[in-house]
Amino acid sequence: MLADFWILMVERGWALALLRGGAVTIAIGLLGMLLGFVVATPLAVLRWQKVAVVSQLVDAYSIVVRGVPGLLVIYLLFFGSVDMVKTVATTFGYQDSVDNAYPYIVGVIAIAVISCAYSIEVIRGALQAVPYGLLEAAKSLALPTRITFSRITFPLALRLALGGINNVWQMTIKDTSLISVVGLQELMRTAAIAAGITRSPFLFYCIAAALFFGMTAVSQTLFSRAERALNRGFGGR
Amino acid sequence: MNLDIVTYAIPFLLVGAKTTLLIALFGIVFGFPFGIVVGLGRGSKNRVLRNICDTYCAIFRGTPMLVQIFVIYYGLAQVGFIRHNPVLWWLIGDGLNAAILAVVLNTGAYTAEIFRTAFLSLPKGLIEAAEACGMSPWHVFTRVKFPLALRQALPAYSSEAAIIVKESSLASTITVLEITGYAKRLMSETFAIMDIFIITAALYLAINVVALTALKLLERRLSFVR
């Protein structure tokens, strides 16, 4: 039993393949989360300031993406962009490189689109939770709006948003598994291929589950450490 | 939008909606009480029971639903004992049953977390008062603890209900044709990707709005001030 496992994992090289898949999962999760967060911040500020029209559009985007399964968003982006990307790439003669990189790019974008919708709500909620007295104090000191935002509102909101961002991240890293259904070789896809070839789906899906569990557990620890650091000086909890 | 495609797609998607609703309904009907039981288990004094419930919650909350559904549908089918047991095989041998099982187990873990915090937040004085009145533990639970915890947990549970509807889409990865499954098929059949997406998104939003409104009404009915 143990010998079989050794042969399967080391001699046939599945352990390495699974680890490589895990690395792709982490990379896509991180990039998607980062991209989503960077896009979400200005959108959340617009929502917070209640800028006419833009605010409603952002709201509509956030409601649709949060109300629809992630799988559907991924299908939309993958099927919707295949032809377009192919034509653009062929005209410029980058056929091969795009064929290889294409699923990764769309994968990151898909994850970003989903995580962005949730991040907007988190950041907006945090911005609203910044005590109004502090902003008034800044105003009475005649600080310019830009400085008030970058030195007071945003850092305070970031601290308040950390818990929500943790939730979004946990969801995002799990959502990356959905990309596997369109053929991107991340952890879940690698496990599916291994399961098909070796005919032992139970083993490989359980290993995939364990690896995902490890990722969420490690990031959970990091987040609670960050939370403790950010709460220093706030009568720490 | 092309009207022909819309009229072609809608009947298929409505058939899919029936399956989605079926999975979501079973998810709520079985997942809700199951989650409460596990939530109680996590707060119990018995250490073994508590550890089992904690581990179950950690595993199902820490791994993607896709992995869970694959382990149940593809993975467990490999285990000989389950294949030869007619009841268990009925449970996981069919895509729809396996999907429902996965949704129930997944939502159970999240519901347990919601109810654990709800039970923790109950004022101790009320429970002591109930005990001082000579109520049996069962009565304390059904008359005091549960109604109060339910009120506390309902807002969080309504977003969990919306998540159940969305998670049911993963059934399409194990050959069950529900809304997302049909949407994928229609997308690759008609190439009207955006049109199909809009109709499908509208369907999901409609289901979620109905579910959330129903739970909001229940919440209002259960609240102290009407």
Image (spheres, rainbow, N blue to C red):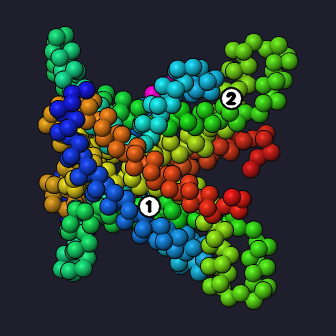
- Total number of numbered labels? 2
Magenta residues span A35-39
Tell which subunit mark 1 falls on: B
Left or right: A9, with B112 as reference point: left
Question: Neighbour class for label 1 at 10 Å: few (<14), some, many (≥20)?
Answer: many
Q: In which quadrant will I find the N terminus of chain A? A: bottom left
Q: Identify the main secondary structure in magenta.
A: helix
> Is the residue A38 above or below the residue B217 in the image?
above
What amino acid type should be assigned to the residue bearing mark 2?
Pro
> The residue tagged with tag 2: helix, strand or loop?
helix
Estimate the x, y position of residue B141 in percent, counting from the top left. 64, 79
Q: Residue furthest top?
A: A92
For residue A103, what is the image quadrant? top left
> Is the residue A206 above or below the residue A170 in the image?
below
Q: Which mark, residue B107?
A: 1
Q: Nearer the viewer, residue A195 or B224?
A: B224
Question: Neighbour class for label 2 at 10 Å: few (<14), some, many (≥20)?
Answer: some
Residue A20 can be seen in this image: no
Q: Nearer the viewer, residue B205 or B6?
A: B6
Q: Which mark, residue A155?
A: 2
For residue A159, what is the image quadrant? top right
Q: Nearer the viewer, residue B103 or A18?
A: B103
Residue drawn at 66 percent across, 61 percent down: B223
> Is the residue B103 above or below the residue A219 in the image?
below
